[in-house]
Image (cartoon, rainbow, N blue to C red):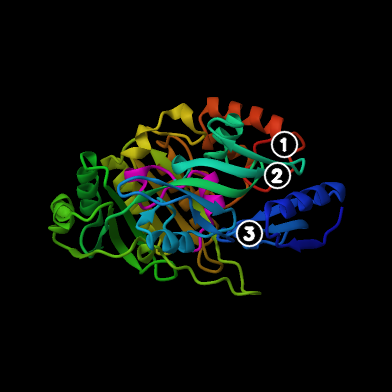
């Protein structure tokens, strides 16, 4: 064993397989970087670091016919901003994450709650096949018909089962999208309730996101706002559906019809040698409903801690139509994703404040169905079962035993045999 870091940038699946065999021979732990958006990607770890950035091709299979989905092959190192730009030029889109620098690999393997999640489901729901380098250094194809158990595990089970060097998705025709920004200067609780009520009977074309962030967050403007994405070009219908939110006092609404790529957030590139951001005290959950008590707790949490974040995204629609057992992803009955937490700023947050933040978050999370692994940024082995249904967790362990019995791929939300 060595404390050195060996970095490699393969350009094809065969080279990835060679690197896995080499790491096995030399007893080197493996870290996979597919996009480099999350904190684990930038943390130094001894062993072999396999960066997939050169596997980033986006290829549309054949000619996409009007009104029909098209099969798209995407390299395991691609990022969603580049994918959205490429597909948008051909009038296509895939429901991805909301940030351009997010890797296709990490987001998809963890599920992928994107900006079109109600219209098209998770990123993983749009996956129809994949090429995978296994723990033994082999290369296999997987789909619903070929190695189906492995394919099932890839759709929400994380990076536990192999290195995906190519993803095969169904991309959807987009005649246009409508986008609404609703800046909130009034009663946030009242606005969230109105948004919740809209979403109860909203068409599946509509996905809504609420975010309230402090000035220190570089990924979005400070303050409270709702962003709403309508999967279609019927702007007038979109306005009508969103009117109960837009017409409230203390809400300033703006409507645009941008390209899908243009609504993805842009995160600054990490600066080499820069200090790591402060720790985050809080968490996330998939909730059956957004009731008044939960809303009140979220609003109170944000008010109590100035350096805190509250983030909500509507679910349902296509997301909820996928049978629970069809993928490894939990909580298909959830109608909202919720995240809340405060930054542990040295010199600002003391032990009493930390305890108060944790206690408030525990009261919020008490009603959740499951935790969403893609938004959990620390390795907590005891928490992993809570990211799946009990049945899915047991099945994932069986798939792990078949494809990675030595736990070669373990730097993730790990599912040991």
Cβ atoms at labels 1 and 2 below 8 Å apart: yes
Residue behind mark 1: 404
The image's mark for residue 409 is 2
Residue behind mark 3: 41
| Residue 303 in sight | no
Mark 1: secondary structure: loop
Q: Tell me which segment is drawn in magenta.
A: 101-122
Q: Measure the alpha-carbon separation of dots 3 and 2.
A: 14 Å
Residue 414 location in percent, x, y? Answer: 65, 41
Q: Nearer the viewer, residue 327 or 68?
A: 68
Identified at 51% across, 59% down, the residue is: 102
Identified at 42% across, 43% down, the residue is: 122
Left or right position of 141 against 350: right
User: For residue 402, what is the image quadrant?
Assistant: top right
Q: Measure the alpha-carbon separation of dots 1 and 3.
A: 21 Å
Q: Is tag 1's residue or tag 3's residue first in the polypeptide sequence?
A: 3
Q: Nearer the viewer, residue 330 or 63?
A: 63
How busy is the neighbourhood of tag 1: few (under 14 within 10 Å), some, or many (20 plus)?
many
How busy is the neighbourhood of tag 2: few (under 14 within 10 Å), some, or many (20 plus)?
many
Left or right position of 374 against 202: right
User: For residue 139, what is the image quadrant?
Assistant: top right
User: For residue 262, what is the image quadrant?
Assistant: bottom left
Left or right position of 5 against 121: right
């Amino acid at each position: 064993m060595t404390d050195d870091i060996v970095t490699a940038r393969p350009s094809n699946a065969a080279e990835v397989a060679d690197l896995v065999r080499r790491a096995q021979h030399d007893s080197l732990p493996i870290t996979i970087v597919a996009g480099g958006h999350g904190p684990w990607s930038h943390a130094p770890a001894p062993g072999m670091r396999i960066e997939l950035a050169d596997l980033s091709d986006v290829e549309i299979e054949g000619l996409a016919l009007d009104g029909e989905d098209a099969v798209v092959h995407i390299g395991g190192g691609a990022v969603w901003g580049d994918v959205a730009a490429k597909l948008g030029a051909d009038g296509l889109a895939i429901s991805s994450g909301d940030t351009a620098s997010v890797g296709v690999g990490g987001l998809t393997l963890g599920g992928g709650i994107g900006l079109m999640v109600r219209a098209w489901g998770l990123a993983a729901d749009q996956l129809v096949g994949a090429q995978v380098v296994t723990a033994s250094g082999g290369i296999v194809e997987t789909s619903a018909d070929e190695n189906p158990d492995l394919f099932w595990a890839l759709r929400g089970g994380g990076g536990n089962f192999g290195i995906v060097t190519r993803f095969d998705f169904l991309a959807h025709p987009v005649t246009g999208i409508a986008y609404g920004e609703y800046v909130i200067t009034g009663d946030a609780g009242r606005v969230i309730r109105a948004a919740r009520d809209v979403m109860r009977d909203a068409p599946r074309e509509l996905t809504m996101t609420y975010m309230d962030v402090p000035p220190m967050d570089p990924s979005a403007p400070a303050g409270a706002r709702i962003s709403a994405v309508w999967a279609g070009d019927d702007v007038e219908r979109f306005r009508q559906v969103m009117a109960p939110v837009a017409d409230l006092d203390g809400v300033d609404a703006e409507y645009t019809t941008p390209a899908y790529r243009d609504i993805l957030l842009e995160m600054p590139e990490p600066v080499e040698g820069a200090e790591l951001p402060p720790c985050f005290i809080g968490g996330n959950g998939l909730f059956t409903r957004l009731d008044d008590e939960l809303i009140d707790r979220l609003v109170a949490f944000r008010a109590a801690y100035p350096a805190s974040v509250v983030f909500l995204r509507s679910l349902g629609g296509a997301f909820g139509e996928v049978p629970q057992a069809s993928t490894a992803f939990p909580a298909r009955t959830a109608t909202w994703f919720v995240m809340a937490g405060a930054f542990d700023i040295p010199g600002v947050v003391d032990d009493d404040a930390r305890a108060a933040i944790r206690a408030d978050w525990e009261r919020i999370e008490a009603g959740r169905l499951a935790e969403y692994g893609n938004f959990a940024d620390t390795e907590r082995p005891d928490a992993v079962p809570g990211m799946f249904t009990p049945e899915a967790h047991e099945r994932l362990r069986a798939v792990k035993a078949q494809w990675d019995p030595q736990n070669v791929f373990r730097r993730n939300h790990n599912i040991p045999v």
